[in-house]
Amino acid sequence: MRTDQYQGHDYYLMDELLSDEHKLVRDSARAWVKKEMSPIIEEYYEKADFPKHVIPGMAEIGAFGPYIPEEYGGAGLDQISYGIIMQELERCDSGLRSTSSVQSSLVMFPIWKYGSEEQRKKYLPKLAAGEMIGCFGLTEPDHGSNPSGMITNFKDAGDHFVLNGAKMWISNSPFADIAVVWAKNEEGRIHGLIVERGMEGFTTPETHGKWSLRASNTGELVFDNVKVPKENLLPGRSGLGAPLSCLDSARYGIAWGAIGAALDCYDSALRYSKERHQFGKPIGAFQLQQKKLAEMITEITKAQLLTFRLGQLKNEGRASTAQISMAKRNNVDMALKVAREARQIHGGMGITNEYPIMRHMMNLESVVTYEGTHDIHLLITGFDITGESAFK
């Protein structure tokens, strides 16, 4: 069993920008990860399963909706605290962070922002406590980067709606208690619906054969004439902008989380470079290895500064979709490059589960694609700076 020796790396003294509350949040999340998750993550990754027994512990460290107001069971923390928690979770594993960010940004966020008061009181406290797990249904088999083309739909049937269609690549779906599903009404307008496990015609088959995000359960959402009560419609907002605003929140969390994965790879590579000797000295004494390490910490530091500023803008309600896209794209790309360089520093040992490198690298191959692909986020920036859409 691998011992978690991680201590953190702060080349530009970012801690001086954090409040005491931020540091407490970080230290609590880090301590929990080291005690509860690091010892078991490789085991669960190998058997391709999420350790559901840790859900109460995740709730205790505020991993579910930390920015949700306390009146609804949340911790009432700011957006930087949310980001810090995502960073500490993904420092362990992207799948762990996925479970948390889906619950927070894609389930709790839309219920909080667009749900009725009855829906908030019914679902949010249980979601915050980990007593209920949710998932988010937007992506379809034929509609990923173009969600507006979705074919999942619902029709008015008097005292209820009838929902039909399918969603895929849904984190948490195999064991989720509820799904926030986006579908078109009879006029073609997109709305959010809360679908509960146990509703007749609602199934969640699991996706197998993944080489990435193996410690996160992924599946489909299938709706075959599902009767959804009308009170389960999110009344606060309709149109594609509603689910995309949820993705903004999730992508913001990913921007922080990817730094965690990069930091773990860098931390392992730095330690290994001091312990591994070749030609009579530690490999960290060779110029090419120092070049790798120096470039890794430089790129991590740049991402830390970018993301902290984004967190400030998010707290002020001024972070734009394009700014969030830039951070998500940059930081995941950075983390992938750091992982690949770290793998080289570890040599052949880098492909074994004695070190976290290959696991992070495989996970990040999913993170670079989901919630907006690397190329799509580039085009979002392009549209923002030119005013010309490449999507039409």
Image (cartoon, helix red, strand yellow):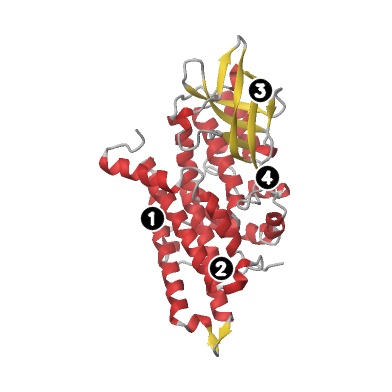
How crowded is the residue under tag 3: few (<14 C-alpha within 10 Å), some, or many (20+)? Answer: some
- Asked if one can make out residue 65 in the rendered structure from this viewpoint, the answer is no
Q: Secondary structure at mark 2?
A: loop
* Residue 95 visible in this rendered orientation of the protein: yes
Residue 381's x, y, as percent?
34, 45
Q: Amino acid at mark 4?
A: His
Q: What residue is pinned by disc 1? A: 306
Q: Amino acid at mark 3?
A: Asp
Q: Report the mark closest to the observer, 4 or 1.
A: 4
Q: Amino acid at mark 2?
A: Gln
What residue sits right under mark 4 in the picture? 208
Q: Neighbour class for label 2 at 10 Å: few (<14), some, many (≥20)?
A: few
Lateral position of residue 331 relative to residue 139, left or right: left
- Report the residue at 58% width, 50% height from top: 97
Q: Residue at x 54, y 71 (%)?
A: 269
Q: CA distance from mark 1 to mark 2?
A: 22 Å
Q: CA distance from mark 4 to mark 2?
A: 35 Å
